[in-house]
Amino acid sequence: MIVEPQPSSDQPAHPSTQPSSLQAASPLQWAVESDADGAPPHDRALTAERRLLCMIVRQLTEELLRATGLESSEDPGRRATSHVRQVAMYVCHVAYSMPMGEVAQAFGRDRSTVGHACRMVEDRRDGRAYDTFVGIVERMASAVHLLAGRRI
């Protein structure tokens, strides 16, 4: 089953006024399953397919960062590696609507680390170039999800 992206409320009312390269990606909605008591799970088990999606997003983020010349492929360094991971965690949480607990499992981190990454990326999105970069990663992630051709 393909999940159709739902338009988010923060997109401009007239998309034609913005160049297509700057339009924000619409978040994709995961099917929310419920626990026995009817509450949605916050830390459900991560499937292999969702973990793979997260690793693809991480790789896309790294490659795009290198292509822009913002990261050297010869000496990525700890800061650049952390930055790539932060953007990838943010995109998995926002573009795929994955709970932070699942994103944390996929990246081998704590849920609070994902929260910190999301806050850091949100704060940096005030810059136009950075916002454009993250938007491109979101659109690429959405395309990967749609290529999967089924709900994962």
Image: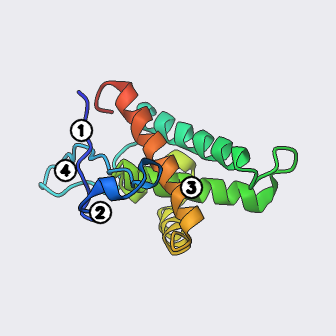
Q: On residue 4, which mark appears?
A: 1
113 sits to left or right of 9: right
Q: Quadrant of residue 33?
A: top left
Which of disc 3 and disc 1 is earlier in sequence? 1
Q: On residue 35, which mark appears?
A: 4
Q: Nearer the viewer, mark 1 or mark 4?
A: 1
Q: Is residue 39 above or below residue 44?
A: below
| Secondary element type, mark 4 | loop
Please name the residue shown 17% across and 58% down the image: 39
Instruction: Indicate the amino acid at tag 1.
Output: Glu
Instruction: Indicate the amino acid at tag 4.
Output: Asp
According to the picture, the residue beneath numbered tag 2 turns out to be: 12
- Count of numbered labels shown in the rendering: 4
Which of disc 2 and disc 1 is earlier in sequence? 1
According to the picture, the residue beneath numbered tag 3 turns out to be: 133
Please name the residue shown 67% across and 41% down the image: 63
Mark 1 to mark 3: distance in Å? 23 Å
Residue 45 visible in the snapshot: yes
| Secondary element type, mark 1 | loop
Mark 3 to mark 2: distance in Å? 18 Å
